[in-house]
Image (spheres, rainbow, N blue to C red):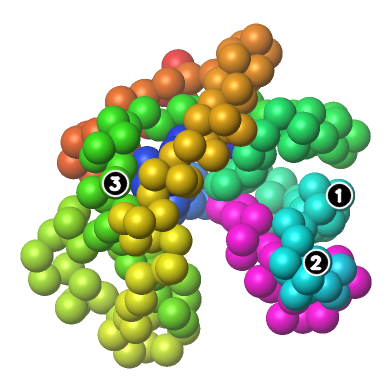
Amino acid sequence: MRIVLLGAPGSGKGTQSQRLVERHHIPQISTGDLLRAAVAKGTLLGLQAQEAMAAGRLVADEIVLGMIRERLGESDTREGFILDGFPRNLAQARALDELLRTIGQPLDAVVQLNVDYGELSRRIAGRRTCSDCGRVVNLLTLPAGALEQERCPKTGQPHRLFQRPDDNEATVAQRLRVYDEQTCPLVDYFRGQGLLRSIDAEGDLETVSARLAQALAG
């Protein structure tokens, strides 16, 4: 199963990716995680990315694609993968298509997670990230007492949560505008390839997970 989860910020891509990882034992590939890991390891691509970020520039698509190519060469991707946060625009989608054709791992499906923008703003404001393992939780949807019972897999201690600077309500409107302009055109692009499946991503976690499973089975 080789899939892309497509959706606006706060639509639940990260949460549903984690569930697919547990269910299908395939890795979630997040470009943000790849960038951080490459920078931390000091790889050639990581140094190039660090230079761009230090200069206040966006990391070039060629660098990100290089990291994705390296990641897809690892053994745990043989049964499939979940791309989360990439592609973000048409240029990236076309480049990704070419990369996946070259390595013989074309996509099986692209699932669009649809959520009302008012609900997205509410969700994003409640989102928190563990500073140690990177796990993302939402204070608004997390069952009562669940977080207290869970331990960070890296430290064995309670998660140390923080709110990302771009997860506050002041920045949400701008992020959604960028999504409309750059990422929404991917819907027609992947629909034209016969890959697009769309689900209602509002509702409780189990309901949305069931919809996603049904979409992937269809």
Residue range (magenta): 26-45
Q: CA distance from mark 2 to mark 3?
A: 30 Å
Residue 132 - label: none
Residue 52 - label: 2
Question: What residue sits 31% from the left and 55% below the top?
Answer: 169
- Badge 2 element: helix
Q: Nearer the viewer, mark 1 or mark 3?
A: 3
Question: What residue sits 65% from the left and 10% below the top?
Answer: 192
Residue 98 in the image: state x and y as whole percent.
Answer: 85, 31
| Front residue of 73 and 98 | 98
43 in magenta: yes
Mark 3 Cα-neighbour bin, 10 Å: few <14, some 14–19, many ≥20: many
| Image quarter of the C terminus | top left
Judging by the rendered image, the residue that carries numbered circle 1 is: 62
| Front residue of 200 and 155 | 200
Q: Is residue 89 left or right of residue 213?
A: right
Residue 115: image quadrant is top left
Judging by the rendered image, the residue that carries numbered circle 3 is: 121
Question: What residue sits 28% from the left and 57% below the top?
Answer: 125
Q: Nearer the viewer, mark 2 or mark 1?
A: 2
Mark 1 or 3, nearer chain start: 1
Question: What residue sits 48% from the left and 20% below the top?
Answer: 197
Dominant SS type (magenta)? helix
The amino acid marked with disc number 2 is Ala
Does residue 65 sit above or below 90 in this rendering? Answer: below
Does residue 51 sit above or below 158 in this rendering? Answer: above
Q: Residue furthest left?
A: 144
Q: Do the numbered discs 2 and 1 sit on residues whose CB atoms are within 8 Å? A: no
Residue 177 in the image: state x and y as whole percent.
Answer: 48, 37
- Badge 3 element: helix
Mark 2 Cα-neighbour bin, 10 Å: few <14, some 14–19, many ≥20: some
